[in-house]
């Protein structure tokens, strides 16, 4: 049986391969899942994505399965306790941003009816399909991720730079950056 051709970034570990094959680039429209991915991408800042993937279950437990309503009410004491949790990245600013971002996420839901409606506007409501031959052609950011980052920052979100926003867009299928010969690209 012929081995599947995949994007080269995911070949180092089984967890990466599973994420690539089942999630990366698949359009997400569920608000809670979008919030989870935005928080996880922010947690990645300065680290590798595999570090975050390895801790994803720990994040889900620590952050009430990314329930924004619960997270928005976290006390300073709760945030301090999270800094002691070895199952997440214990960066003080990243942990503190979770409450702020949850509060702002809820505001966007009120304003737009859903976070999905708000966030997908940056790609015109449908996935942007790219046609890169190799991963070295894939940009770190785009005008769309620049606009998303700028708007999120203007609203007060933290850890939402343009590169983080582009990684979020890739993760949630707002852009499809599977390279041309990847088996996922052909679907």
Image: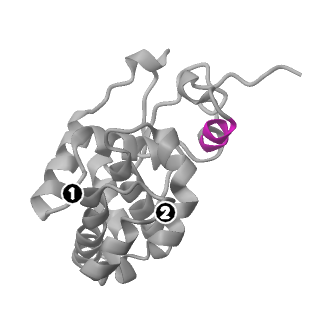
Q: Is residue 119 above or below residue 104?
A: above
Q: Residue under circle 1?
A: 158
- The picture quadrant where one finds residue 105 is bottom left
85 with respect to 6 (left or right): left
Residue 132 as seen in the image, left or right of residue 163 = right
- Residues under numbered marks 2 and 1 in contact, where contact means CB atoms less than 8 Å apart: no
Picture quarter with the C terminus: top right
Q: Is residue 15 magenta?
A: yes
Q: Residue 155 falls in which quadrant of the image? A: bottom left
Q: Nearer the viewer, residue 116 or 152?
A: 152
Q: Give neighbour class at mark 1: few <14, some 14-19, many 20+ (Cα, 10 Å).
A: some
The residue under label 2 is 59
Q: Nearer the viewer, mark 2 or mark 1?
A: 2
**Between 169 and 41, the one nearer to me in the picture:** 41
Give the answer, above or below, for where 135 lies relative to 71.
above
Residue found 28% across the figure and 72% down from its top: 99
Q: Of 58 and 146, which appears nearest the observer?
A: 58
Q: Does residue 141 show up magenta in the picture?
A: no
> Looking at this rendering, what residue extends furthest in the front direction?
84
């Amino acid at each position: 049986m012929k081995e599947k051709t995949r994007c080269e970034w995911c070949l180092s570990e089984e967890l990466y391969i599973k994420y690539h094959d089942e999630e990366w680039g698949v359009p997400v429209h569920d608000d809670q899942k979008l919030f989870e991915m935005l928080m996880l991408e922010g947690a990645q800042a300065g680290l590798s994505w595999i570090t975050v993937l390895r801790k994803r279950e720990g994040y889900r437990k620590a952050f009430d399965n990314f329930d924004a309503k619960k997270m928005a009410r976290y006390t300073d004491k709760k945030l301090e306790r999270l800094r002691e949790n070895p199952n997440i990245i214990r960066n003080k600013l990243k942990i503190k941003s979770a409450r702020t971002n949850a509060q702002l996420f809820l505001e966007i839901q009120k304003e737009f009816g859903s976070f999905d409606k708000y966030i997908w506007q940056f790609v015109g409501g449908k996935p942007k399909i790219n046609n890169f031959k190799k991963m070295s052609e894939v940009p770190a950011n785009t005008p769309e991720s620049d606009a998303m980052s700028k708007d999120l920052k203007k609203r007060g979100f933290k850890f939402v730079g343009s590169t983080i926003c582009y990684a979020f867009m890739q993760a949630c299928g707002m852009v499809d950056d599977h390279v041309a010969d990847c088996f996922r690209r052909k679907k």
